[in-house]
Image (cartoon, helix red, strand yellow):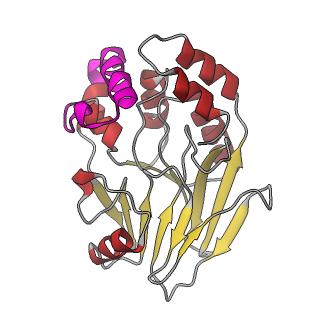
Amino acid sequence: MRLAVFADIHANLAALQAVVDDMAKCHVHRHCCLGDIVGYGPRPEECIGLVRSLPRLICIRGNHDAAATWQFSPYGMQKRATAAILWTMDQLSTDSTAFLKGLPLLRTMGNMLFAHANPYNPGAFRYVLNSKYARRSFGATGRPLIFVGHTHVPMIITRRNLFRIDFQQPHGPLVRRLDPKKRHIINCGSVGQPRDRDPRACYCIWDTRQQTLEYRRLEYDVAATAAGIEAIDALSDAMARRLGRGV
């Protein structure tokens, strides 16, 4: 099975469409969205619709998805994120709101666990960026593969090491064969708002037969999404500017 894992779309339809088109070319069998379909960006309703159209979909609730349905307080977020979520609430159809509200915090499939953030306490949405939260994530499940998002930074974590994935060299797809004897936390990066100084959309494909993890980076029309953000008073121009820098 070839499983596409993606997260942190943040209402960036141009980036999501690029990823969806690429998935089709890569002969993906299943799709897994690790949350944050909405927030920050200008096209939340359309992004929800596109995600929902994917066949054999697993979908997890992210903190922005939860905030857009009052399952997580938007007022506990940064000011720009709060403003974007309050605007987003008014853009969503009743059906889309119900879809977000019904998403689980965790899902499992075979030897894999899927979460937006730290599966140890998934509703708190803690970043898995250091050994403390990595240990807690490993301790939350006996499954050897844990897929997460939330940080917007692609990363592979073993029980002893944290490996940040550097896409500057090589420029094309990056493939890693994972040791089946080790447990791994895999951060798939961000589709719509990368924060690893690479503005290209990021997602990964896990091949269960080959035991390979392929990270893919895709160009998309950054300027179009930035212009869409700038055209909406409730959204922050800073979010538009950071898209081109990947920060």
112 w.r.t. 29: above or below: below
Residue 75: percent from the left, percent from the top?
Answer: 24, 31
The part of the chain drawn in magenta is 69-95
The answer to whether any part of residue 110 appears in the image is no
State left or right for residue 13 relative to residue 81: right
User: Which one is nearer the viewer's eye here, 140 or 112?
Assistant: 140
74 w.r.t. 57: above or below: above
Q: Can residue 88 be found in the magenta stretch?
A: yes
State left or right for residue 93 relative to residue 129: left
State left or right for residue 9 relative to residue 200: left
Residue 175: percent from the left, percent from the top?
Answer: 69, 67
Q: Residue furthest bottom?
A: 181
The quadrant the C terminus occupies is: top right
Q: Main secondary structure of the magenta part?
A: helix
The answer to whether any part of residue 7 appears in the image is yes
The quarter of the picture where residue 230 lies is top right
Q: Residue at x 79, y 56 (%)?
A: 172
Residue 18: percent from the left, percent from the top?
Answer: 66, 36
Q: Residue at x 32, y 27 (%)?
A: 82
Q: Residue at x 34, y 19 (%)?
A: 92
